[in-house]
Image: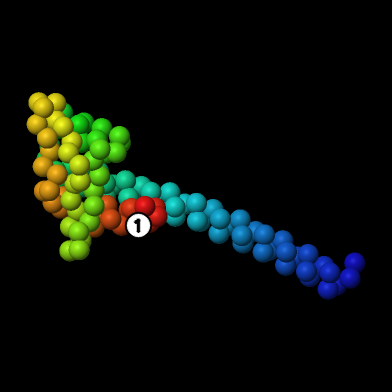
Amino acid sequence: MNAKLKRVIEEIGRTEKKISEWQEQLRNLKQQRKQLEDQEIIKAIRSMQMSGADMISLMDGIQDGSVRFVSDADGNMHMEGGAEYPDGSEADAGEPVHTDGGMEDAAESEGL
């Protein structure tokens, strides 16, 4: 076999191996990012210090789209839309939700 052709075939093999290794590393990094984003979301939600029923109502509102979080010009997160609690009262939609930027970072990294 031609020496030049042999070198090219060997280089292709090495390159394919490197690509496979980089793809595995990328998968691991994406998984790690997701776990860290999830931890930030959980931390932010828990810091709201809501009762269990209120927390469930808030989560239902987020999932059905009646509650969402928006960022103002200062970077503070606010709830938009009123979640109704089991006792019939509504959540204060204008109250800031204090985070350390974790939810914003998570949304940005997911392209939301």
State the image quarter where residue 85 is shown.
Answer: top left
State the image quarter where residue 45 is shown.
Answer: top left
* Nearest to the observer: residue 53 or residue 95: 95
- State left or right for residue 50 relative to residue 39: left
Q: How many marks?
A: 1
Above or below, 80 relative to 83: below
User: Which residue sits at x=30%, y=36%?
Assistant: 63
User: Which residue sits at x=12%, y=35%?
Assistant: 90
Q: Within 10 Å of the Cα at label 1, are there few (<14), some (14-19), or many (20+) other Cα atoms?
A: few
Which residue matches tag 1? 108
Q: Is residue 100 visible?
A: no
Q: Position of residue 73 (x, y in %)?
A: 20, 63
Q: Position of residue 36 (x, y in %)?
A: 33, 51
Q: Residue furthest right?
A: 1
Above or below, 52 relative to 111: above
Q: Quadrant of the N terminus?
A: bottom right
User: Which residue sits at x=12%, y=38%?
Assistant: 91
Q: Residue furthest top?
A: 87
Amino acid carrying label 1: it is Glu
The color scheme shown is: rainbow
Q: Is residue 22 visible?
A: yes
Q: Position of residue 61 (x, y in %)?
A: 24, 35
- State left or right for residue 63 relative to residue 22: left
Q: Position of residue 34 (x, y in %)?
A: 38, 49
State the image quarter where residue 11 is shown.
Answer: bottom right
Above or below, 98 relative to 54: below
Q: Which secondary structure, mark 1?
A: helix
User: Which residue sits at x=27%, y=52%?
Assistant: 103
- State left or right for residue 24 relative to residue 72: right
